[in-house]
Image (spheres, helix red, strand yellow):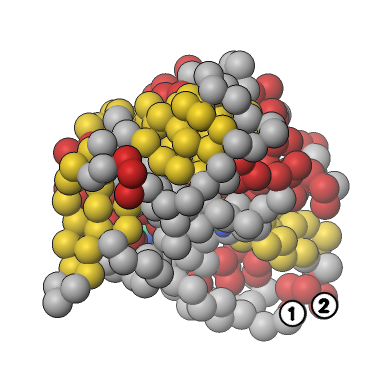
Amino acid sequence: MRALVLHKEAVFSAAVADIATTELPAGDVRVQVDYSTLNYKDGLAITNAAPVVRLWPMVAGIDGSGTVLESQHPDWKAGDAFVQNGWGVGETHWGCLAEQASLKGDWLVRRPAAFSARQAMAIGTAGYTAMLCVMALERHGVKPEDGDVLVTGASGGVGSVAVALLSGLGYRVVASTGKAAEAAYLQALGAHSVVDRAALSEPAKPMQAERWAAVVDSVGSHTLANALAQTRYGGAVAACGLAQGRDLPTTVVPFILRNVALLGVDSVMAPRALRQAAWDRLARDLDTDKLASMVEEISLDQAVDKAQALMAGQVRGRIVVKI
Ligand code: NDP
């Protein structure tokens, strides 16, 4: 089978290679991967920009979708359509930028009938995380009539899906981006208005004028600090990313004077029931025409170059990889 293999011996390398399926790791479900994708974490792994990979050599790819080939797991049988996201796949267990993968049945979710394998990977971990963020805000009680919702990193994968989901649910969305040229793209996804991310990315006071009923933040650092500082009394911020940085230079002031809630969102170890609920919600709430407008399709052979472009901030929306 062909796979994108990462090696780290004297030097790091990332290249498509032929490997025997007999070398696949232990797992109770063997799958054929029809489509995979490049998420931010795949970019980090494939360019070796951060220590994402914990086992060498590694087959890259945290996400995959396709068909079960054989299964020893009671929930899965040959022919079933699956979606794989996270669980350390592509980090500590060989991943899905490959023709086949050996996975655990407990990791997989059923691909909703509404989505093809390609559409499932157009969503990928980025889009499923955007849905988890929206669900976290809903659990907090945020409603469309509460006011504007800010989405940071809006032209990225998480951001694009968050804009489309929130606008589809009736929220007035303000999209923050560093790519002024993508304003029309973001408005077509449903953003009511677009702001320059420079207004949020610099150090500023921990409490500022109240603007947002809620925020979906995939950027972290000063951007998250400013988002918290501008969130209205009783509002909530769903934080899932660190594209600007892993730091959070703020104070407790937004929490103790404005009753602002900071909601952490993790997709990698999210329990199976929550995952399935998120995918079922995506099937109901995500406009597939908007999804199509976010997607660029590449081949496995183009994945290394595209991962570098992703890390350089030169990618808009979502990348699907046709295996
Ligand atoms: P993308 O690369 O697709 O998008 C990130 C976006 O962030 C960019 O498009 C850009 O948007 C913005 N950005 C990039 N660099 C900076 C910077 N220095 N300062 C401010 N904004 C910046 O990545 P994803 O959408 O796939 O992932 C976004 C983040 O979410 C990543 O940190 C990722 O690790 C995290 N993540 C976390 C998950 C979880 O389980 N918690 C799951 C999935 C992702 P623009 O140009 O529009 O400003």
Instruction: Identify the disc placed on residue 256.
Output: 2
For the C terminus, the quadrant is top left
Disc 2 residue lies near ligand 1 with CB under 8 A? no
Give ligand 1's quarter of the image: bottom left
Residue 275 in the image, given as x and y percentages of width and height = 67, 42
Callout 1 amino acid: Val
Give the residue drawn at x 42%, y 24%.
Answer: 118
Residue identifier under label 1: 253
Residue 92 in the image, given as x and y percentages of width and height = 44, 62
Give the residue drawn at x 49%, y 73%.
Answer: 246
Residue 128 visible here: no
Q: How many marks?
A: 2
Q: Is residue 185 left or right of residue 227?
A: left
Q: In this view, does 21 lie above or below 323?
A: below
Residue 283 in the image, given as x and y percentages of width and height = 63, 24
Give the residue drawn at x 37%, y 36%.
Answer: 100
Work out whether residue 41 or residue 181 is closer to the camera in this orientation and state it. 41
Give the residue drawn at x 75%, y 42%.
Answer: 273
Q: Mark 2 packing: few (<14 Cα in 10 Å), some, or many (20+)?
A: few
Residue 84 visible here: yes
Work out whether residue 169 or residue 296 is closer to the camera in this orientation and state it. 296
Q: Do the residues labelled 2 and 1 touch (CB within 8 Å)?
A: yes
Callout 2 amino acid: Ile
Q: How far apart are marks 2 and 1 (CA)?
A: 5 Å
Q: Helix, strand, or loop for circle 2? A: helix
Residue 316 in the image, given as x and y percentages of width and height = 33, 40
